[in-house]
């Protein structure tokens, strides 16, 4: 029986980081990242049959036989966030202290610089509690991208250009479908507003990341069941007003009130066809 290893390691305080270190200002956190990654690799190397007992307490016979048909899990969604902070440095600090308990795979700075913080095949603490379609654990199947933006400012062109390049690479590398590029607001409409109504989803859709409505819209049918339509796209409609606001932040943007106008219904009717 092979020995198993714990998943947790104590993270040194940021105060220990030294800007004059020959290995750079993030030498300590990089070292902790490596230790945690290695511990996961050790767990993946574990090859033993599980100990299972039935309802009477009797041990069920088990065995370990290695198959030849398996592979590493790969991401199938991209979740886009804004940092709600004021600088790239502030966000990196937040993601390199243990007590924050949050992270992301990538951070895109206002300058266009991209910082990679978690290997794409590993699980980052970025999406949190939410629901999209039948998915309730988005962290296990997605890549999280944080955009350096406080939530109340436009996204600079150079930043969006870098984001588009990153999304193109991820889409190609992992075969991520166009429908599977969503915002944090889409995943967690009860909790999160990001990346917000200022995020250029129309530009994203033009490059194959998410969808956008057509210029000419057909009228939604009379008595259109928009709650069902929202749910079929993926939204958690257990609180309808939250789902409506999240949809409008993404696909309408000019109005994010929790009511559906005729224009909103027409847009939803058009968009819902793209998700079929």
Image (tube, rainbow, N blue to C red):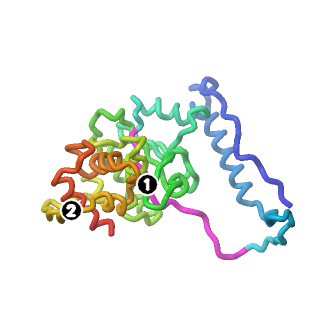
Image side of residue 1 versus residue 242, left or right: right
Q: Is residue 24 visible?
A: no
Q: Earlier in the sequence, mark 2 or mark 1?
A: 1
Mark identifier at residue 223: 2
Q: Residue at x 52, y 32 (%)?
A: 94
How packed is label 1: few (under 14 Cα within 10 Å), some, or many (20 or more)? many
Label 2 vs label 1: CA separation? 34 Å
Q: Position of residue 117 (x, y in %)?
A: 53, 44
Overall secondary structure of the magenta section: loop
Between 63 and 129, the one lying in front of the other is: 129
Residue 153 belongs to the span the image colors magenta: no
Can you say which quadrant of the picture contains the N terminus? Answer: bottom right
- Above or below: residue 22 compared with residue 51: above
Q: Position of residue 85 (x, y in %)?
A: 41, 31
Q: Which mark is residue 133?
A: none
Q: Which residues are magenta?
A: 67-82
For this orientation, the residue located farthest to the top is 15
Instruction: Please check the rendered image and state whether residue 74 is part of the magenta-colored stretch, yes or no.
Output: yes
Nearer to us: label 2 or label 1: 2
Res 273 seen here: yes
Which quarter of the rendering shows the C terminus? bottom left
Rendered residue at 47%/63% (across/down): 174
- Which residue was labeled with disc 1? 78
Q: Position of residue 271 (x, y in %)?
A: 26, 61
**Residue contact between numbered discs 2 and 1, judged by CB atoms under 8 Å:** no
Q: Badge 2: how crowded within 10 Å, few (<14), some, or many (20+)?
A: few
Q: Which picture quadrant has residue 167?
A: bottom left
Q: Secondary structure at mark 1?
A: strand
How far from the left and from the top, in percent, is residue 266?
Answer: 18, 59
Q: Residue at x 46, y 53 (%)?
A: 131
Q: Which one is in front, 159 or 62?
A: 62
């Amino acid at each position: 029986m092979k020995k198993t290893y714990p998943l947790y390691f104590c993270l040194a305080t940021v105060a220990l980081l030294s800007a004059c270190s020959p290995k750079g200002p993030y030498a300590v956190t990089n070292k902790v990242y490596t230790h945690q990654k290695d511990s996961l690799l050790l767990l993946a190397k574990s090859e033993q049959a599980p100990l299972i007992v039935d309802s009477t307490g009797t041990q069920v016979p088990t065995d370990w036989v290695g198959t030849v048909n398996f592979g590493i899990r790969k991401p199938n969604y991209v979740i886009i966030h804004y940092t709600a902070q004021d600088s790239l440095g502030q966000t990196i600090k937040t993601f390199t202290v243990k007590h924050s308990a949050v992270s992301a795979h990538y951070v895109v700075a206002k300058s266009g610089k991209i910082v990679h913080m978690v290997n794409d095949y590993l699980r980052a603490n970025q999406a949190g509690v939410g629901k999209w379609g039948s998915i309730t654990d988005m962290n296990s199947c997605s890549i999280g991208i944080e955009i350096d933006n406080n939530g109340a400012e436009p996204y600079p062109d150079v930043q969006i250009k870098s984001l588009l390049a990153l999304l193109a690479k991820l889409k190609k590398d992992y075969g991520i479908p166009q429908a599977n590029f969503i915002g944090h607001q889409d995943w967690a409409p009860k909790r999160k507003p990001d990346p917000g109504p200022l995020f250029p989803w129309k530009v994203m859709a033009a490059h194959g990341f998410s969808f956008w409505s057509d210029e000419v819209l057909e009228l939604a049918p009379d008595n259109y069941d928009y709650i069902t339509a929202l749910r079929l796209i993926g939204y958690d409609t257990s609180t309808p007003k939250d789902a409506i606001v999240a949809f409008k932040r993404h696909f309408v943007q000019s109005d994010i009130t929790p009511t559906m106008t005729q224009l909103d219904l027409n847009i939803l009717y058009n968009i819902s066809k793209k998700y079929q």
